[in-house]
Image (cartoon, rainbow, N blue to C red):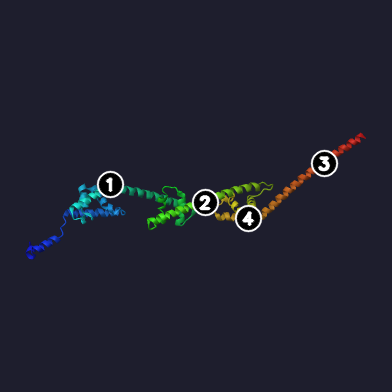
Amino acid sequence: DDLIKISGPLAFEKADRDAKPIESTANIHYRTEYNRIANQVRKDIPDLAPEYLDVEVYLRAISKGEIKDGDRILSQSDHARTLKDPDQVQQYIEQVKAKVPGYRQYKQDIATAKAQNTKDRKAYEGLAQSVRTEMGDLKPGPLDVEICIRLTLDNPNLEGILAQSDWVKSRPTSEDKTIYIQSIQNAASQVIQTREAIQAQQAQDRSDYETLAKRVRNTPVQLSTELVDAQIHWIADHEGKPGDGDRFLSQSDRVRTLKDPEQVAAYIEHIKTQAPQYQQQRIDAAKAQAQAQEQAIAQAAEGAQRDGDQVMYQNFATKVKKK
């Protein structure tokens, strides 16, 4: 009334149009409740998709009060307050309610994914520790390759476990992660093929070693283990290809008890130094065999001579008796 008296009806109408309505005490209460619940949701579920924020707020509101409280709190949400038409506000509230079944499935999927993620992380850490115990500290790439090999390439959860690698997590995009995991799988496949080829060659070398060992031990001279290996090395290098001696010795009984590659290399080098002694043993064995043969021949000749003399004596004796 004072405004009309002072400024006139037109000024009053303009002021009335521009004036902001005073919020009711109830709206302030529900707005405060919405902010409180929304902030708690953001804290509890930091990775919640934005379209589900008001759905979670609504579910929490009705879990502690009446369904109407949920509607009233939603009417004071950030989005609802941008709507001027009450019908639009009510339509938005109904849209939020319609999302509840899908949101519950979404939460179930998230919980399942988190549980699987925890399981995968535990599996990855266990495999990583096993690799480090067996092979020492490895760089991230080789470590993941060994883990991939232990998982086997047909493991249905291979990618999920490899995704727990710190190296994978450091990749900026999902595409980078996929490319890295694929490269690890390819590298693991190549390593498996290489190791299978090595194992096949080692099996053949072991068979060749055992064959030569039987041949070497078939001698009148008793050879020590080292001299047996020395002879095998010499035969392999002289009757086979260069390098066969080292490969065959790498599968010897003695070497197979050694775990340190440096010890294996040292033993093979040591065996090579036994060659002169081995050669002397071969010479001694050949001499002993030749002497044995000569002695057998001499004994046979002496026996024949003795038998011949006996026959001649008996012939002469017969003649004497006749005379």
Chain-order first, disc 4 or disc 1: 1
Q: Residues within 10 Å of mark 1 (few under 14, many from 20)?
A: few
Q: Secondary structure at mark 3?
A: helix
Chain-order first, disc 2 or disc 1: 1
Q: Is residue 310 left or right of residue 79?
A: right
Q: Is residue 172 left or right of residue 88?
A: right
Q: Which residue is mark 4?
A: 272
Chain-order first, disc 3 or disc 2: 2
Chain-order first, disc 1 or disc 3: 1
Q: Residue furthest right?
A: 323
Q: Residues within 10 Å of mark 2 (few under 14, many from 20)?
A: few
Chain-order first, disc 4 or disc 2: 2
Could you tell me which residue is drawn at 35 percent across and 47 percent down? 112
- The amino acid beneath tag 2 is Arg
Q: Secondary structure at mark 1?
A: helix
Q: Residue furthest left?
A: 5
Chain-order first, disc 3 or disc 4: 4
- The amino acid beneath tag 4 is Lys
How far separated are the C-alphas under marks 4 and 2? 28 Å
Could you tell me which residue is drawn at 46 percent across and 49 percent down? 150
Could you tell me which residue is drawn at 22 percent across and 50 percent down? 93
Q: Quadrant of residue 316?
A: top right
Q: Secondary structure at mark 4?
A: helix
- The amino acid beneath tag 3 is Arg
How far separated are the C-alphas under marks 3 and 4? 51 Å
Report the quarter where the C terminus lies: top right
How far separated are the C-alphas under marks 2 and 1? 52 Å
Q: Which mark is residue 101?
A: 1
Q: Which mark is residue 195?
A: 2
Q: Which residue is mark 3?
A: 306
**Location of residue 1 in the rendering, given as x and y in whole percent from the top left corner:** 7, 61
